[in-house]
Image (cartoon, rainbow, N blue to C red):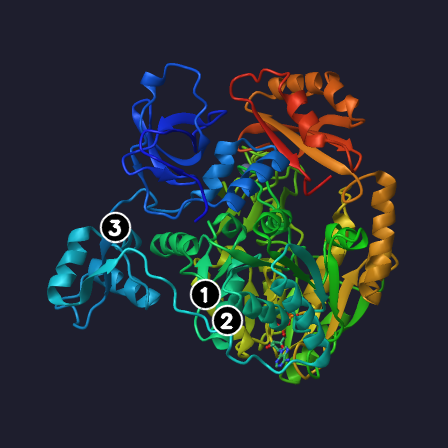
Amino acid sequence: MTDQFFDEGALVAVLTTQPLDRALDYRAPEGGCHLGAFVEVPLGPRKVLGVVWGNGEGGYDLAKVRSIIRVLDAAPMREDMRNFLIRAADYTVTPMPAMLRLATRAPGLGDAVSMRKVYRLGHNEPDRMTDARTRVIAVLEEYGDLAFTLGELSEMAGVSTSVIKGLVKQGAVSEEDTPRDLPYPRLDPNLPGHELTQAQADVADALKAAVASGEYGSTLLKGVTGSGKTEVYLEAVAECLQQGRQALVLLPEIALTAEFLTRVEKRFGAKPAEWHSGVTMTERRRCWKMVGQGGAQLVVGARSALFLPYRDLGLIVVDEEHDTSYKQEEGALYNARDMSVLRAHFASAQVVLASATPSLESWANVEAGKYQRLDLEARFGPAVMPEMRAIDMRDESLPSNRWISPTLQRAVSKRIEAGEQALLFINRRGYAPVTICRACGHQIGCDHCDARMVEHRFQKRLVCHQCGETKPVPEKCPSCEAVDKLAPVGPGVERLAEEVAAQFPDARVAVLSSDLYGSARALKEQIQSIAEGGADIIIGTQLVAKGHNFPLLTLVGVIDADLGLQGSDLRAAERTFQLMRQVAGRAGRAEKPGVALLQTFQPDHPVIRAILSGDEEGFWKAEAAERKAAGVPPYGRMAGVVLSSPNVQDVFDLGAEMARMDAPLRRIGAQVFGPAPAPIARVRGRHRVRLLVKADKGAPLQAALREWVAQFKLPTNLRLQLDIDPQSF
Ligand code: ADP
Ligand code: ZN
């Protein structure tokens, strides 16, 4: 450890997670502390978490400086991490305390005890089964090899701790003392992987060489789904582990981790550490600590895994790098893909961005010479990319309230007869997107948001997809009070399931939609069952587009390929292209070739044509030209400012004032647009307006934004959120 050490009594600056605009001075505690140490400090009457950030400032009554209460049992935050947080805060225009909060999300970080009691399944049967006891046993069985603390177990089973204690007495639950946090089993990077094809080996060698350099570098790994990108980046992970450094693999969707963990176990002989919202508190605390101490070699996780305190991070893989879920949309707004590059930079690590359909941002970085590009052109083994065709809906005759064209229906029947699977894709959750009154035309909306309520028939309720508010489907129209006149309009995944059941009465149907699953586990089981042939027709939303491997699937039917092309968002074309290519890529991943059929009313639309032809370079060049002409990302810079308040007048007044007082922006040649109602103009009762700021690529946008925003005094209850590189513009 080369980091600076402060002796007892030395004046140090501590950055806390409290919303203060600077670090505060404290005295180093008994025994001293390292720069970067996680500490507990007094703040007014409270104790708060902080990190030793540097030398104290002094310059005031030193007698009043209080002491750090204690140093927490965690490795000090390293310099590369501190620098990363500073730069990330600067880039996203996020206050440092909010940034630090992302890096201290370790449950139990403040706990001092180093031993704890944990609970597992015991050897005896309980002598008498009660509901409460059954729940405890069920939780322990479900999580198998995981141990829980008393608090966790009682919470998860919904029982009092005395129930658990009772089960311990009978030997039905075992109680053990363990060190708080155990290292993860060692991964062995020397185990042999699959034999790679020549093309794969070339790419793997290039990645390994990059990792072996021990320096920062970024690579775009582009390859069609099933080409072996995962196979190849696992070789880079192996190289990284051989160097004795840590690796991080980011996945866009928790549902994908199970399959990935199994793959890692096959490749390296043990499972890696996991970090995402589906992981228990115990495991998260363990992960956080072990990452810091080097007891975790590989972490698989969601975007927040970037903020773990790695001891020596050598490689970050961002799988499906184009995925929009990498953008954090609440609190500190950041894009995990972009932050990975920053994180790697400070850690002297390599970044691998993997995708079949890279983001325009990454294409542009390749073009600018910032990223190297490696390609895997062909699918592995006999699998070939599916043939893609349009079904011109103008030529199909369909009765109203039906969405599967005769052509698509025939294609599905054929596949089922051949013992294969068909996937019908519709990117809409629920039963119907709109519920309308046939008497007066009223559409049922959310009371708190500017959004229509979506009928969810499985739940028998109307649901607002913005705020989650639900209500029963009313019998009378809330506007004209007509009875029995409310009707669903348009298809959602549940309604499509109804049509499928009517048209294919003998088929086994599986519906995959994120809201239909109680737990990640249930979803995982459903996916497993589909992969093993437990369904003939799969009906799915966006959830199925991501990474899953269904070997029997040979037909993909897209119900509404035009859906994403409506609206004025400049990213709509890119998103539609990516989504359609991803969904189509689900077909024909094994021996049997696949087909993707796109139902569209505009088969000559340039985006639809690019999707069908698969001419990615052509599509990218056309998109790039349009964005260049418009001066928008990735060829210009943009930021969004969202003002929200329960008071609609306040947001428009401040918005107008901000648009007027734009001198700091004009000085850097930036323009302000708006205020306009935000893409969703009201959420949870708060009115929202948005201003967009557009600047040239090289302009110092963040500094100008800070200066601009600092001019205004916000009315109470008004929130101002800056969003660098907004998702929609
Ligand atoms: P991608 O990440 O590009 O979608 P994968 O790495 O998941 O591709 O590979 C697709 C499938 O092919 C996986 O089941 C994988 O195990 C298999 N595969 C890829 N390359 C090889 C290889 N060289 N030897 C054996 N199996 C391979
Ligand atoms: Zn709502």
Residue 405 visible at all: no
Q: Give the image location of residue 583, x and y in percent.
A: 68, 64
Q: Nearer the viewer, residue 222 or 659?
A: 222
Cβ–Cβ under 8 Å for marks 2 and 1: yes
Disc 1 marks which residue?
A: 272
Q: Secondary structure at mark 2?
A: helix
For the C terminus, the quadrant is: top right
Between disc 1 and disc 3, the foreground one is 1
* Towards the viewer: 598 or 453: 598
Which quadrant of the figure has residue 386?
A: bottom right
Residue 34 visible in the snapshot: yes
x and y, in percent, of residue 453 in the image: 58, 42
10 Å crowding of disc 1: few (<14), some (14-19), many (20+): many
The part of the image, by quadrant, that contains residue 250 is bottom right
Q: Identify which residue is drawn at 50% across, 71% down.
A: 264
Pick whichever, 60 or 493, lies toward us: 60
Q: CA distance from mark 2 to mark 3?
A: 31 Å
Q: Is residue 362 above or below residue 34?
A: below
Query: Which structural element holds mark 3?
Result: helix
- Judge left or right: residue 324 versus residue 666: left
Marks 2/1: CA distance? Answer: 7 Å
Measure the alpha-carbon separation of dots 1 and 3.
Answer: 26 Å
Give the vertical position of 478 relative to 485 (above or below): above
Which residue position holds label 3? 151
Kind of residue at disc 1 = Pro
The amino acid on which the numbered mark 2 sits, given as a three-letter code, is Val
As drawn, 253 above or below 405: above
Q: Which residue is mark 2?
A: 264
Q: Which comes before the other along the chain, label 2 or label 1?
A: 2
